[in-house]
Image (spheres, rainbow, N blue to C red):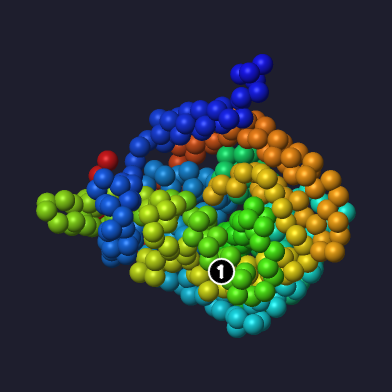
Amino acid sequence: MLVLLSLPYWLPRAVTALRVWLFARINGTEGVPVPGDLVDVSRFLEVYGHPAARGRSRGAALSDLFWYWLSPGADVHQEHLEPGPRHAEVAACTRRVLTLPSRRAASMAVESLRAAPPPADRRLVRLRDLAMPVWAEFYHRLVFGEPCPPGVRELIVAHADDVVTSLKCCGLRHMDRRLRLTAYLESSLDRVPHLLPASLSRREQAYYLQGTFFNTAVVQSSEATAHALMVAATEGRGEGDGPAVGELIEETLRRFPLFGVAHRVTYEDIGLGRDSVIPAGSVLCFNYPEFHAKGGNIPFGVPTNRPCPAWHLAPLTVQAVVAELLGAYTFTTWAAHTRSLPNRGPCLMTPHGQAARLRLPLLAYLRVRDRWEEVTRSIAQLVLGTYMVWDARRLRLCERHFLLDEKGNHHDPAPRRGPRR
């Protein structure tokens, strides 16, 4: 009985350690950790911003896994394109779409929240689930210049939720959900008021919109919103005014960075002095949480090496949505809050002016449920995550793409010097 009752306190950690070991066995121990033994925290920004550390996918076995999780169309996702004309054209398009006056961006975010309001009949919510329809609505308005047609918001949410759930190894991919969104986007390209990259085929343009805006942008904005509301809920912050919420967002992104590890492939040797060299073809794994924990703060990357293109838009739009929610509701939780947020942020949400009936019993229920969910979730992550890592290595989506590239079937520029295995 004691072993059974103690499961939530030791089993998840043990299963997670086993999962990490299995991932390394299947996927290899490729990568130079930064910060780490070779590059300490004092040289993190120097190495991250080095001109030779610009490779994205080619030559990194890790890329097979990320392409698998982010498919379809991972080859035209802005984050995966190698430096060159194609990436420059795609990045320029993304900047055009994301360029919006601050006041208009904030008001559009609030309009999107009002178009996808929280359920009035629910007090217990998952904050990521609460936020995702808002950002599906927002980015549809941003890309198409109009509100979501009936059913489309649900289509975008189903796709984004499927991607982030598989990324956290809490569920397998459901390609049918993803391909339904692809079909919608491809059939709706003529309604996009922005000039899309001409070097991409019509299908690739749909993949580009799907990956950049209706995957990465929706998921990351939802995660940022959920993290900020979890911080407010656990620390009793109920301020809805601009300055206080701005500080909350800044602190949240520092404590719970949206990016875990970003990998880059070196095109050339990087000298570190005293005969220490990072050879060409190395895979550098930049650990954001560890860098932040040691005093750094780069929530949107570094300007010298392809920072997040939404570095200006995302904070002010998330701030607008969080301020609106905190101005209408009180959020409270006793559930765990971690950077990966696999529990989707369980929370008690009470409208201002209403008594929180059964508040303490509900919070206690959240805590107990969250503890036991961690047990079942850790086991599911072990099984499903191991399968997906194995399946990604079997399919080799990234490696096969660049093998075709060498035969002239693709046009992404690639480094001339291959990785040193």
State the quadrant of the C terminus.
top left
Q: Position of residue 206 (x, y in %)?
A: 61, 63
Disc 1 residue crowd, few under 14, some 14–19, many 20+, Cα 10 Å = few
Amino acid carrying label 1: it is: Glu
Residue 394 vertical placement versus 188 (above, below): above
Left or right: where 119 falls relative to 251: right
The one nearer the camera, 307 or 102, is 102
Furthest toward the top, the residue is 1
Question: In the rendered image, is residue 188 in sight?
Answer: no
Q: Quadrant location of residue 53?
A: bottom left
The one nearer the camera, 206 or 161, is 161
Question: In the rendered image, is residue 302 in sight?
Answer: yes
Residue 163 vertical placement versus 385 (above, below): below
Q: Which residue shows up at 75% across the image and 60% down it?
A: 330
Q: Position of residue 34 (x, y in %)?
A: 33, 51
Q: Which residue shows up at 39% across the image and 60% down it?
A: 296
Q: Position of residue 277 (x, y in %)?
A: 18, 52
What kind of element bears circle 1?
A: helix
Q: Position of residue 20 (x, y in %)?
A: 46, 34
Q: Which residue shows up at 79% across the image and 60% down it?
A: 118
The one nearer the camera, 57 or 31, is 31
Q: How many discs mark residues in the rendered view?
A: 1
Residue 208 vertical placement versus 399 (above, below): below
Q: Quadrant location of residue 29?
A: top left
State the quadrant of the N terminus.
top right
Q: Which residue shows up at 72% across the image and 36% down it?
A: 369
Left or right: where 127 falls relative to 216: right
Left or right: where 285 falls relative to 113: left
Residue 379 vertical placement versus 206 (above, below): above
**Which residue is under mark 1?**
247
